[in-house]
């Protein structure tokens, strides 16, 4: 890459005011990850203060492919081009890697096969308290988790790249700070590269995989918007998919022709592979399904006389409730998970397709359900169980976006007296957790 191109890359990514960066090493993405992980762990083990020489890049705690790819890509750009010390941290433990088959497939396509040695995870940092680094870059979310900020008074967020609802934090410290709509956060990361940037094929493939799974294969009139089309058009010629495309086909790749992007045979094939692996959770039980795609939030109940602070969680499950939660499994494992995470509120959001009922896509009709649990904590007088549950049910039922109706085809018979439960069918199947999370916050926190 020419020095002028590197300067444009540094400017586009707001990577600092250093002199002209050194061109990136052409070694594999896997080598970059394993080397960075080993050096970071050696540094903090030798001297905890060395953690402050690193910036930790994190996706959200759900650990989905978008968070995974975005954190790896942002860390690679900062480290290999700008020559600063950034390390991607996966906010799931090593034992949870196998819960997401689509992640494993995308990582394999990117040449990342030894996850234990190539990915820094929360398991690698168990027993280290407080967290050894105090500088963070956030991708695929825009609020630093309590575990990284609560006991670290000098914690600083220096970058935010996200596509969720903007909480307007770190507006003074974060540069870049990009929080805007997109089907996938990976699209924002990818479009930060100038068109003449040199991107490893493995990295382009990983980012493209995240975009495809988040946008349903870039289908027209789906979740993909212009920034996703621009990102895909940039990545496809630079990815391993280009190996099977003719020069004329590659020449026709353009964000102005989104239908062509979605119809490319290699794009359709990769989208199908990822989708099939994501939706096949038949080997997972209720416990694994609840923690597989899980996000956690902290809310202050301003309407409550004592204004308590509570924890709430949202678990997304790609399977119908009765297929895995019947016979008391849903109630039992929800209670177990809430006790494990010390939750007061848990929402289980399902997404699935009904075979035999076909939508416009030619696939089974898309459906969503919700199961909500409100649980007494150690002090039942503080939470006011019935007041909290009633407030939540009314808020959900009044919302015009999610359009819920009570679920009458599944009964829960093993609900403990310290818990309140409500099941809903969701009328608007397009409303994902990105819509439910801010709704939950508004219901619980609004005075």
Image (cartoon, rainbow, N blue to C red):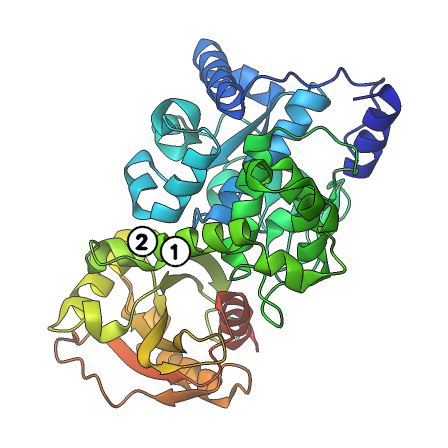
Q: Which mark is residue 183?
A: none
**CA separation in Å, label 1 and label 2:** 5 Å
Kindly identify the residue that appears in the image at 53 percent across and 32 percent down. 88
Displayed quadrant of residue 57: top right
Displayed quadrant of residue 90: top left
Viewer-proximal residue among 136 and 83: 83
Viewer-proximal residue among 120 and 276: 276
Kindly identify the residue that appears in the image at 36 percent across and 80 percent down. 389
Kindly identify the residue that appears in the image at 72 percent across and 45 percent down. 191
> Crowdedness of circle 2 by 10 Å Cα count: few (<14), some, many (20+)?
some
Q: Position of residue 195 (x, y in %)?
A: 79, 38
Q: Position of residue 434 (x, y in %)?
A: 54, 65
Mark 1 — residue? Answer: 294
Mark 2 — residue? Answer: 291
Q: Position of residue 410 (x, y in %)?
A: 21, 83
User: Which quadrant of the rendered structure holds the C terminus?
Assistant: bottom right
User: Which quadrant of the rendered structure holds the N terminus?
Assistant: top right
Viewer-proximal residue among 232 and 336: 232
């Amino acid at each position: 890459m020419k020095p002028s191109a590197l300067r444009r890359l540094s400017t586009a990514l707001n990577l600092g005011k250093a002199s002209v960066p050194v061109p990136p090493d052409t070694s594999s993405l896997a080598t970059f990850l394993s080397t960075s992980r080993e050096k970071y762990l050696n540094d903090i083990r030798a001297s905890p203060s060395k953690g402050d020489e690193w910036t930790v890049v994190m996706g959200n705690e759900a650990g989905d492919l978008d968070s995974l790819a975005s954190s790896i890509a942002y860390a690679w750009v900062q480290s290999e081009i700008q020559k600063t010390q950034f390390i991607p941290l996966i906010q799931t433990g090593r034992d949870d890697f196998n819960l997401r088959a689509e992640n494993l497939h995308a990582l394999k396509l990117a040449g990342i096969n030894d996850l234990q040695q190539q990915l820094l995870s929360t398991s690698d940092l168990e027993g280290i308290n407080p967290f050894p680094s105090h500088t963070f870059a956030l991708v695929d979310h825009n609020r630093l988790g309590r575990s990284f900020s609560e006991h670290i008074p000098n914690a600083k967020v220096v970058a935010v790249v996200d596509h969720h609802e903007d909480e307007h934090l770190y507006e003074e410290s974060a540069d870049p700070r990009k929080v805007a709509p997109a089907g996938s956060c990976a699209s924002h990361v990818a479009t930060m590269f100038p068109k003449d940037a040199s991107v490893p094929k493995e990295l382009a493939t990983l980012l493209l995989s995240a975009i495809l799974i988040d946008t349903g294969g870039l289908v027209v009139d789906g979740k993909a918007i212009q920034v996703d089309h621009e990102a895909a058009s940039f990545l496809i010629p630079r990815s391993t998919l280009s190996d099977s495309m003719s020069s004329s086909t590659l020449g026709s790749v353009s964000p102005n022709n989104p239908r062509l992007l979605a119809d490319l045979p290699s794009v359709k094939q990769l989208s199908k592979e990822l989708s099939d692996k994501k939706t096949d959770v038949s080997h997972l039980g209720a416990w694994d399904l609840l923690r597989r795609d899980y996000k956690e939030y902290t809310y202050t109940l301003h309407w409550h006389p004592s204004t308590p602070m509570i924890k709430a969680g949202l678990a997304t499950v790609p399977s119908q409730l009765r297929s895995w939660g019947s016979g008391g499994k849903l109630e039992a494992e929800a209670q177990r998970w809430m006790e494990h995470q010390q939750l007061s509120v848990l929402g289980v959001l399902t997404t699935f397709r009904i075979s035999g009922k076909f939508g416009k896509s030619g696939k089974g009709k898309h459906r969503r359900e919700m199961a909500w649990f409100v649980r007494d904590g150690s002090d039942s007088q503080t939470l006011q169980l019935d007041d909290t549950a009633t407030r939540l049910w009314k808020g959900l039922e009044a919302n015009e976006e999610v359009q819920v109706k009570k679920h009458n085809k599944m009964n829960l018979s093993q609900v403990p007296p310290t818990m309140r439960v409500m099941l809903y069918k969701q009328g608007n199947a397009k409303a994902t957790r990105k819509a439910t999370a801010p709704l939950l916050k508004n219901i619980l926190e609004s005075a």
